Image (cartoon, rainbow, N blue to C red):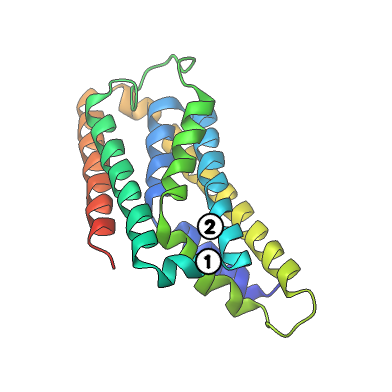
Amino acid sequence: MSLEFLLTSIVVVLLPGTGVLYTLTIGLGKGFRASVAAAFGCTLGILPAAIASIIGLAVMLHTSALAFQIIKYLGVAYLFFMAWSILKDKDTMAVSEDKSSASALRIALNGMLLNVLNPKLSLFFLAFLPQFVSPDAAGATNSLIMLAAVFMVLTFVVFIGYGAMASMARDYVISRPAVMAWIKRAFAGTFGFLGLKLALSD
């Protein structure tokens, strides 16, 4: 495994996207433990894309406009649903001292679906992983699996960091409800923007 792969992966994982946004949302609303569940779900959601890329199924998304469009609009609908939930559901980003109401399974499942319903993730892995493995090398498939696993571990660790930072801001937000209201609007708007951006993608 090359240092170039590690550095590139860290940069990619650090870039704000739906997974980062979701983890921050949960960290602010539910605390650190819940943000770990969000990070785990987002990381688990990478698995189908990684597997599809390794065995070549991602080529279907790249060559079949219909397959890409179906998955894309499912992803768009889910992003819009997340935006609506943040604005309308009082429990999604409900900040209080009581953290017991958060369901780790539900949080992880939502995070997983965010990545599973993102067709660009499969295309990303299809383009990203092969750059660091020679197709003629012995055990190329095993190398791809190892690189995908490392990428997922890095994702989990970085997302936990994001969740920890968000949870540390809870005390400030709890004492200032107006701040939370603006954060909810900003996060909902960002989810909506990401959904619109995905809808307009080719």
- The residue that disc 2 covers is 49
153 vs 3: above or below:
above
Q: Residue at x 45, y 15 (%)?
A: 101
Q: Residue at x 73, y 75 (%)?
A: 140
90 vs 202: above or below:
above
The image quadrant of residue 133 is bottom right
| Position in image of residue 96 (x %, y %) | 37, 17
- Marks 2 and 1: in contact by CB < 8 Å? yes
Disc 1 element: helix
Q: Residue at x 46, y 18 (%)?
A: 99
Question: Is 12 in front, or is 194?
Answer: 194
Quadrant where the image shows the C terminus: bottom left
The image quadrant of residue 113 is top left
Disc 2 element: helix
Q: Amino acid at mark 2?
A: Ala
- Residue 165 appears in the figure: no
Q: Residue at x 61, y 72 (%)?
A: 5
Asked if residue 74 lies left or right of residue 143, the reply is: left
- The residue that disc 1 covers is 125
Question: Is 11 in front, or is 79?
Answer: 79
Q: Amino acid at mark 1?
A: Phe
Quadrant where the image shows the N terminus: bottom right
Q: Residues within 10 Å of mark 2 (few under 14, many from 20)?
A: many
| Position in image of residue 35 (x %, y %) | 49, 34
Q: Earlier in the sequence, mark 1 or mark 2?
A: 2
